[in-house]
Amino acid sequence: MEKRKIIFIAPEFYDYHKIITEKLRELFGETFFFPERKTNWLYTLLNNIHPKLINLYQKIYFFFIWQQIKKEENITDLFVIRGYKIPISFIKKLKKKFPNIQTTMYQWDSIKNNSYEYLIPCFDKTYTFDYKDFEQRKDLKFLQLFYTDDIKKIRDNKVPPQYDFFLFNSFTMERYDAIAKIIDYCKENNLTVKQFCYIPYRTFFKYKYLLRIPLDKSLLSFSPMNREEYIDCLSKCDIVVDINHSTQTGLSMRVTETYGAGKKILTTNKSIQKDPLYNKTWAQIFDVNNIELLPFEKQEKNSLTDQLYIDNWLKTILE
């Protein structure tokens, strides 16, 4: 494969940005990673004073990124995941200096969550994981999320389950309420559950002391779960429970990784029925207000299993 020189811009989200950067270097060649934003005290202050000030903050931030990039030669690709408030001027500068550059964007947020329509005309290709956005726009390609090497190892080296359900979430009030109901269901039906819900302390403080909404600390964690612990929990469970974000229709990373690991899933995301991945051998839709667990059919591997492995996923996007 011809070697390339890639500018990769993405959120610093758990370890996914590191995993993707390493894979890009392994598969394509030299890769320069830049976070889509620097979330520091200044960013937080400006966002609290007036969110529109973030546009200015991002312009300054990308000006400094440009100062590093402009010294390089023969950049072949700009690959952006999410790309929160990237200035159009930055992309124009790249295209002017590198007229043959290939520009590709992947969105793991819905347009409703992250308004990126203004960026679409700047890119040669834009992929989305969100069904609704894909159905409503002709300038988007559809592609599910991916799974990584450590997920593949779970499928290849299965161990007997140690607990029935695994819940892995970042806090929203909707998810918090659902977690409490699922735990009650498990207690009533003699099922074991491993539960984790991350909440930044400032968010906990806001809900508990400013909004006066009582939160049970035993259901929450102020520190994110590290990758190794997550992989260990996923490998030891039988069924993963996915509480979908109500403003998105795409399958979350949790769903794709569950599929890649050869596990079963209960999800609140009804849009899963539209996905080529979906069948009743591994996925069921449930209502948190009326939980009913039906028997799963015998699980079989299909062709999409390999397609969504990160190596092949990146090759599809950057072909």
Image (tube, rainbow, N blue to C red):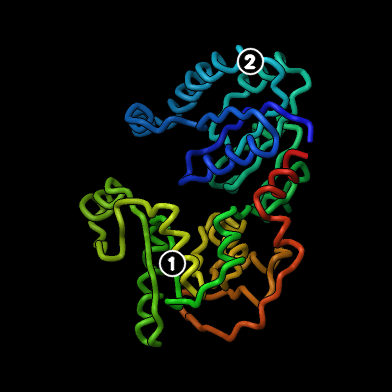
Quadrant that contains the C terminus: top right
Kind of residue at disc 2: Glu
Q: Residue furthest front?
A: 157
Residue at left offset 67%, top offset 19%: 94
Residue 116 x/y as whole percent: 61, 37
Foreground pick, 12 / 306: 306
Q: Amino acid at mark 1?
A: Leu
Left or right of 176: which side holds 37?
right
Measure how far apart labels 2 and 1 are at the Cα level. Answer: 44 Å
Which residue carries the number 1 mark? 167
- The picture places residue 237, in percent across and down from the top left corner, at 47, 72
Residue shown at the point (73%, 53%) measured from the top left: 135
Tell me: 76 left or right of 216.
right
Disc 2 versus disc 1: nearer the observer = 2
The residue pinned by badge 2 equals 72
Q: Who is closer to the viewer here, 9 or 199?
A: 9
Position above or below: 170 against 264: above
Residue drawn at (65%, 83%) of the image: 297
Residue 305, picture quadrant? bottom right
Q: Position of residue 152 (x, y in %)?
A: 60, 60
Instruction: Identify the residue at horizontal 63%, vertical 53% (top origin).
Output: 146
